[in-house]
Image (cartoon, rainbow, N blue to C red):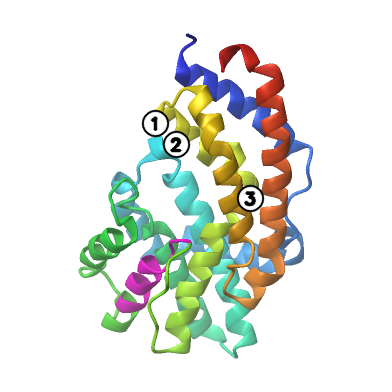
Amino acid sequence: MADVTNLYMRLRERARQIVSRLPPPDFYRVENVAVSLSESLFESTPLVVDLRQSVAPLLEDDFGHGWLHARKVAVDAGALMHVEGRAAGYSGEFLRRRTCLAHCAGLLHDIRRKRPDHAEQGAACARGLMSGQAFSPAEIEDICIAIRNHEAFKTALSVNTHEGALVSDCLYDADKFRWGPDNFSDTLWAMAAFARPPLAEFLRRYPSGMERLARIKISFRTATGRTYGPQFIDLGIVIGEELYRVITAEFAAEI
């Protein structure tokens, strides 16, 4: 049998070829100002820069939820916060601060990804990391609840304030954006290389994975997420369906 890790890296390259033929999600074109601002704040805000240094050793790049994933979630969560915050009347320093809190939630949300109940354990770990940094108790609580609430198909904890709920909802939506093209460019293959299932087992589970992907389409929580999120998922479904045909045709001898 061919080396399983090598097999999944070959599949990743075929998946990336499929992804490259499709347009990027509209979110990055229509909301490019918010995305660019979020990227700038992510790279320059001392609070976020300091937290990145603390978080980096805890992110597990061999499981598809490491630094690349955390950065994308953080930047998109910040962009969502900027759009949603402006719509809610946030402005100036308050809006910048809430955007940075969304960044922090994105950085921290998967620091316990390999653990059972990773959202709950991640929130507990995040609380400890933030306790010695420049966060207020209310900000720490908002971020920890957001981390607790980011898992799909689970009932979210209630949040007492609008600004706290917005951190939670922006994190959730930014994380679920990754279920689109990013899932097939990176995440799926890192997880497969880690678990190393035989290709036949991978294919046996494939339909249930696609069903979960379709279900996530109606779960976006912010108005902006509901506007753009379904397209991320539709792109993921198109990629996933074509990839299934590629695997069964081009890799049949390895099943």
* Label 1 element class: helix
On screen, 42 above or below 140? above
Callout 1–callout 2 Cβ contact below 8 Å: yes
Would you say residue 150 sits in the magenta stretch? yes
What's the residue type where badge 3 is placed?
Gly
Would you say residue 110 sits in the magenta stretch? no
Left or right: residue 213 versus residue 22 is: left
Alpha carbon distance from label 1 to label 2: 6 Å
Can I make out residue 179 in this image?
no
Taking depth in this image into account, of 131 and 171 the one nearest to the observer is: 171
Point out the image quarter for the C terminus: top right
Left or right: residue 178 versus residue 143 is: right
Residue 206 percent coordinates (x, y): 57, 38
- Which residue is the site of mark 2? 191
What's the residue type where badge 1 is placed?
Ala
Callout 2–callout 3 Cβ contact below 8 Å: no
Sequence-first disc among 1 and 3: 3
- Which residue is the site of mark 1? 195
- Which residue is the site of mark 3? 180
* Label 2 element class: helix
What's the residue type where badge 2 is placed?
Met
On screen, 147 above or below 186? below
